Amino acid sequence: MRRLALALTLLLAACAATPLTRLSAQQEPGDPADRRVAKHLFGAAATASAGAAQPIGFYSRGCQAGAVQLPETGPTWQAMRLSRNRNWAQPDTVAFIQDLSRFAATLPGWRGLYVGDMSQPRGGPMTSGHASHQTGLDIDVWLRPADRLDLSVQERETISSIDMQRAGGAYVNDRWTPAHEALIRAAAMDPRVERIFIFAGAKVAMCENATGDRSWLAKVRPYWGHNTHFHIRLRCPPGASGCEAQAPVPPGDGCAEALEWQRNILNPPPADPTAPPPEPRRDLTMADLPGQCAHVLQAP
């Protein structure tokens, strides 16, 4: 009897220590009891789900159904860091980046684009590197001009983009060119684009150099960590009822905000000694995501 009780105890302990990989019979998708860490589940999905294309949820709390893969190499682009398997997105996103790459190929010194992270095959939180890129509507584009489109798989793992910032991001450096500005302007003027994120010094430079119609500048927003690439975020496609839109950009061209970022970089405001330390960002669980995302994971 003691042996039976011991065996049962060990079995229950093993079950408790084993992470859930499927919903239990009692759980429903979106159940608040579903505390599985979402990045492990979505990061393990090697292929897209079958069915209609659909971005689900918000850019930083969602997933994607029916994604398509950007081909590793095209006439005017190459996808980088292929080992990450993050060259998946919604069909509109793939069409957009192909269109932008064709424009890039008309710029001096550029034969197209080096495309960084898009999304995982079924979107969702990533195992590293991004809070967003979850719904198949975000794209990172390298600021390194694509002067070769015959890079090997190994080269795409080892070469790096180019750092364009100076003075901690307050200014651009001498590698920044009018072609960079023309590329970002073309992306921002596309009605499919919601926002573009890049370091503050680049936004300030574009504000100083822009002539004529300046409305496109409103979409270009300063953000930390975007000094070797710029991040393009597309709007929710028409008819995507499960997609949560971002609030519209504030009125104006945003240049005053960029100058404020620049001033704060050059002369950081004093730290508030009474401010509590920031809380570490916790991993999202399946309960944090729209209920449809559990179905996306379970789909063939």
Image (cartoon, rainbow, N blue to C red):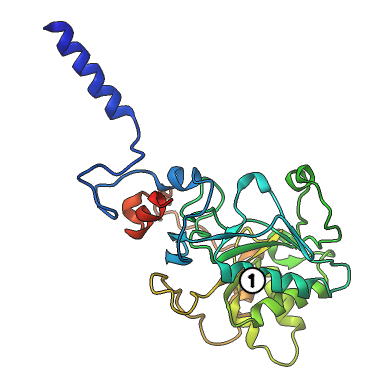
Q: Which x, y percent locates residue 249?
A: 51, 80
Q: Classify residue 108 by image quadrant.
A: bottom right
Number of callouts: 1
Q: Residue furthest bottom?
A: 212
Q: Residue furthest top?
A: 2
Q: Residue furthest left?
A: 1
Q: Which x, y percent locates residue 159?
A: 78, 47
Q: Which x, y percent locates residue 43?
A: 50, 45
Is 256 located above or below residue 117 in the figure? below
Q: Is residue 267 visible in the rendered structure shown here?
A: no
Q: Is residue 209 visible in the rendered structure shown here?
A: yes
Q: Residue at x 60, y 48 (%)?
A: 85
Question: Helix, strand or loop at disc 1?
Answer: helix
Q: Which x, y percent locates residue 14?
A: 30, 23
Which residue is identified by label 1?
Answer: 95
Is residue 17 toward the left or the right of residue 192 in the image? Answer: left
Q: Residue at x 41, y 47 (%)?
A: 38
Is residue 13 toward the left or the right of residue 52 in the image? Answer: left
